[in-house]
Amino acid sequence: MTRTLRTVKVKLMDKEASCTALFDTGSGITVIQRGFFEENFGTRWSELDKPLKLYWVNGASINVRRYSQVVIVVDGFELPETVFIVDEHVEEVEVEGKRVKLPELIIGSGTMDKYGITLDPKEGVKLTRAVLLL
């Protein structure tokens, strides 16, 4: 499992906000903290028909009820993505051998695979293939 922190932008309609993102190969999905989302975008989310049960890396489970279609901007590339909005959040994780406060956004392996994002030990986050959106 590899993890790297990076500042990214999140866009939704006419609003944009910068945040710290954790690129985490151990997470299958992309999630965003509800507090950060509401502060920057209000309640512009959709509700799932029934809650989705997810598991944090520490084994704790949470129920997710909300999601939104946003654009995540990494190194100038705009990546449209569905993010799940989480009420409950793990406070700290280990990144590169250090305990750090969990960032507002966790970018999971599904998003990284879709857009060809890799984590290089020396260079950090790399987009390894061109992103073409029509």
Image (cartoon, rainbow, N blue to C red):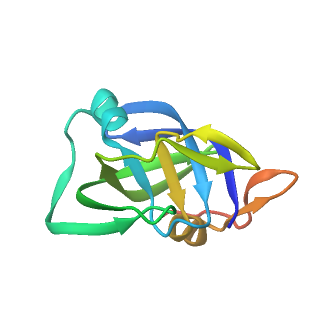
Q: Residue at x 21, y 48 (%)?
A: 45
The answer to whether residue 14 of the structure is visible from this angle is: no
Q: How many marks?
A: 0
Extreme-top residue of the structure: 39
The one of 71 and 21 positioned closer to us in this rendering: 21
In the rendered view, would you say 59 is above or below 101?
A: below
Image quadrant of residue 20? top right
Q: Quadrant of residue 37?
A: top left
* Residue 86 drawn at (x, y percent): 32, 50
Location of residue 12 in the rendering, given as x and y in whole percent from the top left corner? 34, 41
Image-based side of 9 in relation to 25, left or right: left
The residue shown at (74%, 60%) is 119
Q: Residue furthest left?
A: 49
Please tell me which residue lies in front, 31 or 132. Answer: 31
Would residue 87 be visible to someone looking at this image? yes
Q: Tell which residue pokes out farthest to the right in this image.
A: 122
Q: Position of residue 85 (x, y in %)?
A: 31, 50
Image quarter of the N terminus: bottom right
Is residue 44 depicted above or below 14 in this figure?
below
Where residue 84 appears, as percent x and y from the top left, is 33, 56
